[in-house]
Amino acid sequence: MEKQLLFILSFLIFTSCSSVKSTQEAINNGNYDGAINIALENLKKNKTKKGNQPYVIMLEQAFVKANSKDLAQINFLKKDNNPESIEIIYGLYANLKNRQEIIKPLLPLAILDEDRDADFKFVNYDNEIIATKNQLSDHLYQKAKELFNSNNKLDYRTAYTELEYLEKINPNYKDVRSLMEIAHQNGLDFVIVSMKNESEKIIPKKLEEDLLNFDTYGLNDFWTVYHGRKNREITYDFSLELNLRNISISPEQVKEKEIIKESQVKDGLKYLLDENGKNILDNEGNKVQVDKMVNIRCYLYQFTQLKTAKVVGRVKYIDLTSLQLIETYPIESEFIFEHIYANYKGDKRALNKSYLDLVVLKVVPFPTNEQMVYDTGEDLKERLKYIINQNKFRN
């Protein structure tokens, strides 16, 4: 028990020393906010604990150094007078305020050796934050409006991003929400999806309809809309073609397999005899009876109906603006029809449950070639969906 307590005490001392060292290293490396976070986490547990005194001192030091660093950068950026720096300045002022807010709940913090409280000079940055936020809002608004003059979808997407950030920091600023809707609509890519049958085999009409029913794919994302049927009012940006190049269907096959099963089963009772052929009696003088076991055999004839369909094709990505082929991807799907049934000759008591289940089944009609091709569709659809998800037109 004493050894265990000694181990725990040693571990706590080591952990504490390691944490203090990490805090000091963070200060030495200029990671002042990192040092502040480590110190605060330890002080939250017990701010009056004597062993936590180093964190109070380092917190005081890191706070001063972090504020000096941020204020120096703000002064430099203001002198540089670059509109693109407004967002950085806004972020720095927000950091200055947040740094104060996370320390306030722990105050006061006493430095015992110096018989004083740690000194944190707090400043009200609200006016600077509001002024900078207004400057940033105007800058982001004008920047987005300028991007609207472009006829480029990617510029509209950039404009949307700027407006989205503006809405976050300054909700309902001017007509930002309506501009976001305009930017979104103008930044959308429309993709028309089509299917071409180059296999010289007839495919079911319903299969084509299912493959082009993109409402069931769940593929539309924020910037991309897929259509399986062309809308004449829309100018499409890209084309996705599913070309079926080969459809093969195997002959109908029936495979037969004979299985012999043997077993011992109870077949009534018999009198137990001794080595002389006389009946063995129990304590009451009655003849002893035992189970009569017999060997049985059953011949199982298992039939497997088998038919397969395989569809091979490729998916083509085409830029409709330049009429250039972007990329092609192979696609392949297979459907296997398999039905197993059986009959038997002999004593079916020799069969286990799995074989007995087969015996009750009968031969079924083979699916038509058309049905086989159609049944490949669900797998083909999933493979097409995977290709599209993995290969977006624009990231």
Image (cartoon, rainbow, N blue to C red):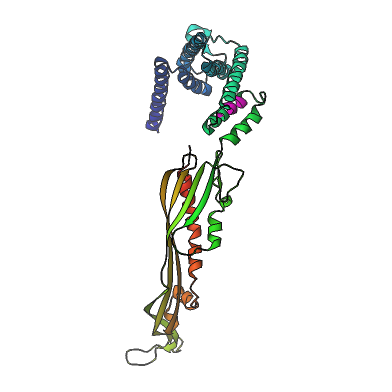
Relative depth, front residue between 42 and 201 = 201
* Residue 343 as seen in the image, left or right of residue 93: left
Measured as percent of width and height from the top left, residue 321 is found at: 49, 39
Magenta-tinted stretch: 161-168
Asked if residue 305 is positioned above or below residue 84 in the image, the reply reads below
Residue lying farthest left?
275
The magenta stretch spans residue 163? yes
Residue 270 falls in which quadrant of the image? Answer: bottom left
* Residue 293 as seen in the image, left or right of residue 192: left
Residue name at image x 41 percent, y 17 percent: 24
Measured as percent of width and height from the top left, residue 238 is found at: 50, 43
The magenta stretch spans residue 351? no
Query: Which quadrant of the figure contains the N terminus?
Result: top left
* Residue 178 as seen in the image, left or right of residue 102: right
* Residue 282 visible, this angle: no
Asked if residue 165 is positioned above or below residue 230 in the image, the reply reads above
Relative depth, front residue between 143 and 262 = 143
